[in-house]
């Protein structure tokens, strides 16, 4: 492979990755809503990136279940079903509670301080009824705990779900009571760490995740 060809391939890969991140961000922040249909050409124009990297980015996003490519139409932003949500919450609960059990002895005072700071940010978000900011910090809280176990395979699996979990969580927390409940559950998680209560810590991590699904079901039934 010539130097020029390598540079072209590197540039193409970089553009594809940039397009992937930009489109996913627009889906996660709600600019592109579930069920929206948009053509590849329109997306390329909107992002000021050529069609080919956009197409490859959309193929990756389809594989990650953020959208569906429809020939001659473009893409449809994926609507997360109740069954999707159940599978995501169950997978998170299984892996994160197991990781919490294994990570417990590795959690230091500095880690607890980090979680306390995250909790304070969550309190501010709840006081302002800022669902997006709360969910961003909620994911940060859980991602930090997961990372303490140090299992790269677990982290890779769950990290890929967190953006979809963010979308689901926003729906779940439209019930304002859920915001306060989740905040209280995070407080219990931290308190268990302070008391060195391993069983309580693991249990409350799992409860917090599964209660999110319960709240989502209640929201859909309203």
Image: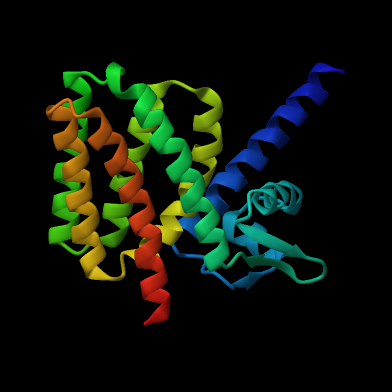
Q: Is residue 24 left or right of residue 93?
A: right
Vertical placement of residue 148 versus 116, above or below: above
Q: Nearer the viewer, residue 70 or 4?
A: 70
Residue 120 appears at what percent x and percent y? 14, 43
Q: Is residue 130 left or right of residue 72?
A: left
Counting labels gives 0
Residue 2 appears at what percent x and percent y? 85, 17
Q: Residue drawn at (44%, 60%), measured in percent from left and top?
A: 168
Its colouring scheme is rainbow
Q: Residue 164: in sight, yes or no?
A: yes
Q: Nearer the viewer, residue 109 or 28?
A: 109
Q: Residue 116: in sight, yes or no?
A: no
Say which quadrant the N terminus sits in. Answer: top right
Vertical placement of residue 107 versus 16, above or below: above
Residue 165 appears at what percent x and percent y? 45, 53
Residue 141 appears at what percent x and percent y? 30, 39
Q: Can you name the residue that lies furthest to the right here? A: 1
Q: Can you name the residue that lies furthest to the bottom here? A: 222
Q: Is residue 72 left or right of residue 178?
A: right
Q: Residue drawn at (17%, 25%), measured in percent from left and top?
A: 196
Q: Nearer the viewer, residue 83 or 115?
A: 83
Vertical placement of residue 209 versus 217, above or below: above
Q: Residue drawn at (61%, 64%), measured in percent from left and top?
A: 78
Q: Nearer the viewer, residue 93 or 62?
A: 93
Quadrant hosting residue 102: top left
Q: Residue drawn at (41%, 37%), measured in percent from left and top?
A: 96
Say which quadrant the C terminus sits in. Answer: bottom left
């Amino acid at each position: 492979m010539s130097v020029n060809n390598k540079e072209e391939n590197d540039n193409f890969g970089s553009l594809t990755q940039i397009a992937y991140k930009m489109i996913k961000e627009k889906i996660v922040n709600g600019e592109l809503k579930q069920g929206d249909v948009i053509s590849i050409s329109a997306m390329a124009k909107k992002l000021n990136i050529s069609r080919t990297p956009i197409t490859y980015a959309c193929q990756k996003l389809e594989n990650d279940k953020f959208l569906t490519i429809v020939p001659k139409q473009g893409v449809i932003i994926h609507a997360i079903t109740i069954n999707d949500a159940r599978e995501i919450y169950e997978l998170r609960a299984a892996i994160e509670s197991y990781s919490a059990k294994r990570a417990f002895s590795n959690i230091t005072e500095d880690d607890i301080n980090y979680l306390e700071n995250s909790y304070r940010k969550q309190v501010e978000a709840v006081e302002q009824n800022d669902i997006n900011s709360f969910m961003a910090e909620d994911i940060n809280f859980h991602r930090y705990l997961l990372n303490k176990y140090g299992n790269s395979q677990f982290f890779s699996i769950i990290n890929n779900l967190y953006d979809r979990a963010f979308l689901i969580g926003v729906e779940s927390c439209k019930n304002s009571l859920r915001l306060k409940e989740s905040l209280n559950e995070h407080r219990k998680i931290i308190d268990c760490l302070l008391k060195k209560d391993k069983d309580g810590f693991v249990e409350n991590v799992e409860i917090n995740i599964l209660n999110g699904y319960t709240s989502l079901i209640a929201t859909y039934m309203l």
